[in-house]
Amino acid sequence: MAERLTSYACVRGSQRIAASRWQATLVYALRDQTNLSVDGGPAYELAHGQGSLALVPAGRACTLGVEAPGIAAVVRINLRMLRKRLRDHNISFSCEPSQRHLASYSELYRRVEALLSAGAEVGDFADFHYDVAELALLDCLLDGFGGVVAAEESRAHAFRSYVDAHFDEPLSLAQMASHFGLSTEHFARVFKAEVGETFHARLTGTRLEVATERLCTTDDTVTRIALESGFPNVASFNQAFKARYDTTPKRYRSKHERKATRQASATAKDAALLAERPAASVRDGWDITIDARARKEVLRASWREVIGLGTVSTLADSRVREQALWLKGHLSFERWRVACDFAQYAGEQGLYELGSCFDFLVGNGFVPHVLVEYGLTCDPEAYLASFEAALHHMVNRYSVQTTRTWRFELIVRGRGTSGSWAAYLDLFERVTATLETFGYTEGLMGPGLRCDQRCDNLRTFLHAARRRRIQLGAVTIACRPAAPSHEDGRDLLVRTADRYYLRNQVLLARETLEQEGFDPELLVVGGWRDSLESSNIMNDSCFEAANIMQTVLSSQNLVQSLCYNDSLDLSVDGPTQSVFLSGRPGIISRDGIPKPSYYAFDFLARVGRVLVFANERCIASANEAGNYQIVCHNCERLNAAYLATPERELDYRIMGTYYDEPSERVIRFELRNVRPGTYLVKSRFVNEEGGSVGNEAERMQLWNIDEPSRSEVEHLKACAQPQMTLERYVVTDGTLSFERVLQSNEIAYLHVIYLY
């Protein structure tokens, strides 16, 4: 049987699990309590049903202590095979009991149990059921607990990684040289210089390392191990093994204790334990019941607080100003975030240019949220002098009363996940003192960091701030569908398809604030967007609109402010800025056409202050006239095919393959205790068939062209409008019932109007 992506065993008592750079280990307390100690890492007490899962990363050994009558399930994940499935992308996972508040944590319980149940099956379809359960488990891990590592690799790392992924194939020097675009002779020299050994030595060593591990951890025959480790025959394997270890494979196996878990079928007793499942998390249904007499909640619309306009310098462009004014006239955001590196505006000419941009904002009623950007290479004294001069200029120009309504947030560009916060906090204190000099009383915000997988970088910042007794106006974080990590001296981004990434990062950050003695209400999402790069075709699609809605609704009441990073494609720098539609993250295209993502904010803006229903799929409000405003979506889940493709290589022609089983959904609404009479349900909706500029450009074959004609742009503006339907209902018994069918990634706004 071919090597699987996973293997598992049920463990009682104590057991030592050896380190393997090829496998991550998922430990699940199947019954009672399990103590898990990770070498060079944390120790966990895993209790069934409450924080019962933890993942030991590859390269770490661990020790299990399972107290009788407890049982632990140990699942080994073959990262080498998984990497091959994901087009040679590195994979990183992180799962520990501190994440138990996440819905995906409870989902992982069920995926592990389903794998064990499938492994206990016998019969003709047992392997098929195990394959299905295995893929579901890996999908859950990728979706909620890690993903592809997005980082610029050194050549040495790229060479080693490629050998690690393909050693079991008939890999030759010429094939690998061709893959990296080099001649065979040149590649051989470069490989040895970068890696420190020849290609053949590295390849043979990797094959022997894998074979040695399998000799100690499986019952497979020597012949099978040799062939599946990449050796052409047993003779060549024995020869290489003898040269390395000075013994034969059979003698080596007999002398070494089998230290790691082996793939095994669960016993009938183990399988019976699966009935003892932890309580499943409540999953939002598609039946929406609204009681008009129920206690109502006042809406805390964090998404209306602020939106990003890009760098302040882009406001010198008349097209950006025109689009910003249009956006302000249609969406009522309270503040508008502009990023400013004050070092660029030193001197009289710089102040004139900066003043021109702020004149536009202040003169047109924009209340600025000023993102004070500071580069690590800047001279702090010169930067502070430029900041003070600019602030003095603004106070004199607009008055103290006007500038007091602004907000200021200090972030440092180019700071990785490691390092001290001393330089940042020095600048923080001095910028705060400057603001106070000019009568600014609201606290300075910062530091705008991306929380790592355990929030260790936020915890380090809070420790440093507390030691210096610094008063924080708000603690800001920046959210992306990835978590920064620091491994082997490199700063990495672990990319994920977790559709609740923002909510999960916010929950972890709030928990960290509370643990460190800070008020969780200080937390603000200073900027977020769904793409890592500035070009991702999903940003022009209906998916982005549905995902914005889902992100906003699933994060409701967790933060005071939730700032979407980019409102205008024109304000996002990059090599494809001149292209008509290039996947930029703005909600308005370069040519001023509203994208589906614009309508996500437009629909949400129509929700009133008095809530009568809210979950991650739908939000509804009511007013005194007996009318209701309902916003809902059918956001699909991204799959491994999306994760395995770099964002700049995503193809709009096969966009449907990046989702996990896209399908229509029926939402059944039931409004109870409404007054009798006639109601009009007015539906506005955006889907791939109407209202989506991206889909219409695809139908017209205009995608990625530089300059569409004026008539083509006007046609697209006309098409980029929500569709509309009207339906009448007569209520006699106090209950209004109706249905809405949502296509894949459709968003909808339903206005229920009492007529008479």
Image: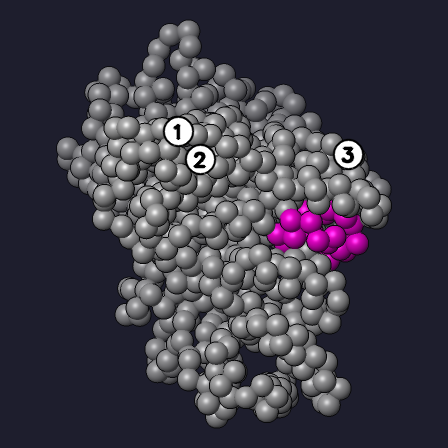
The residue under the point 46% across, 85% down is 440
- Label located before the other in sequence (3 or 1): 3
Q: Name the residue under label 3.
A: 700
Q: In this view, does 538 lie above or below 234?
A: below
Reply yes or no: does residue 585 show up in magenta.
yes
The residue under the point 42% across, 84% down is 441
Q: Name the residue under label 2.
A: 681
Q: Is residue 83 visible?
A: no
Q: What element carries label 1?
A: strand
In the picture, residue 162 is in which quadrant?
Answer: top right
Q: Name the residue under label 1.
A: 729
Q: In the rendered structure, which amino acid carries the disc numbered 3?
A: Met
Residue closest to the eye, 247 or 222: 222
Q: In the displayed image of the protein, which residue is found farthest to the front?
A: 756
Q: In the rendered structure, which amino acid carries the disc numbered 1?
A: Tyr
Residue closest to the eye, 50 or 205: 50
The residue under the point 28% across, 31% down is 735
Callout 2 crowding tier (Cα within 10 Å): few <14, some 14–19, many ≥20: some
The residue under the point 63% across, 31% down is 689
Magenta extent? 574-594
- Label located before the other in sequence (2 or 3): 2
In the picture, residue 358 is in which quadrant?
Answer: bottom right
The mark closer to the camera, 3 or 1, is 1
Q: In the rendered structure, which amino acid carries the disc numbered 2?
A: Val
Q: Measure how far apart labels 2 and 3 are at the Cα level.
A: 33 Å
**Disc 3 to disc 1: CB gap under 8 Å:** no
- Residue 61 in the image: x percent, y percent? 38, 45
Reply yes or no: does residue 91 show up in magenta.
no
